Amino acid sequence: MRPLRILRTEAISHPQINGIMRDLQTARIADEIPDTILFTEHPEIVTVGPKARRDGVIVPSGYDTLDVDRGGGITYHGPGQLVVYPIIRWEGDEQSVPGVIDRLEQWMIAALQVIGVEGVHDDRMQGVWVNGRKICSIGLSFLKWVSRHGLAINIDTESGRVEALDGCGLESGLTTSLHSLGYKHDLEGRVIDRNRLEEALLQTSTAALGRTPLTPIDFEA
């Protein structure tokens, strides 16, 4: 089974991570590195994808914004969120954009199940939903079937910030965080935070992604 390199960073700006993702994608295309997952978080910013720009989606005042080149509409980033960037070369029958999105959704759903949260797919919008509310966004771009961008799961984001956005064509209030839904501890009583979600994602990555995670490495930008 193919190895999966795991990199972790502390909070890093989205413009800075864009450069890192591009470098990793280029290296993966050249086969200089193995498939890689990058775990990180960002200072508050709202990223705006091409679809949102075409549809004329307006971000409310009081939010910094950044245009990005991934699929999807607008996505909130901020403290209390885990962002997961899969720099993976998808091969053979994996080469389907809807299939990759579904695989990543199912990965997140499996990780949530580990901590006692029932996540589901909802036909209204790609991503992962809990109790009828969206808690995880997914948006990707591909070059030679190596993915960039990824998933953002709201764990304990600042109250009201993500809820105020009309994300991806959804009415405001439909997107929220795990803690806001009352999911603050896992089945063992451990606090659900970034570290706990990372553990659950690593635990489920082999079955979900068909790749074996290596020991996580702290990555300094």
Image (tube, grey):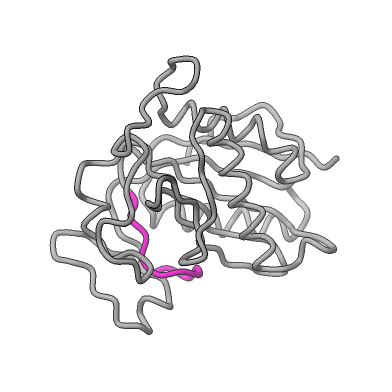
Residue at 49% in and 26% down? 196
Q: Which of 76/32 is in front?
A: 76
Decide whether residue 14 is among the magenta residues. no
Magenta residues, start to end: 68-77
The outermost residue toward the front is 131
Q: Quadrant of residue 109?
A: top right
Q: Establish if 171 lies above or below 58.
A: above
Image quarter where the N terminus lies is top right
Rendering coords of residue 93 (x, y %): 83, 63
Decide whether residue 72 is among the magenta residues. yes
Magenta segment's dominant SS is loop
Q: Establish if 25 lies above or below 124.
A: above
Q: Quadrant of residue 55?
A: bottom left
Rendering coords of residue 68 (x, y %): 42, 68
The answer to whether 193 appears left or right of 119 in the picture is: left
Q: Establish if 63 lies above or below 7.
A: below
Q: Which of 187/21 is in front?
A: 187
Residue at 53% in and 32% down? 198
The answer to whether 103 appears left or right of 112 in the picture is: right
Rendering coords of residue 25 (x, y %): 64, 58
Q: Establish if 124 lies above or below 182.
A: below
Rendering coords of residue 102 (x, y %): 64, 58
Residue at 66% in and 35% down? 204
Residue at 25% in and 53% down? 163
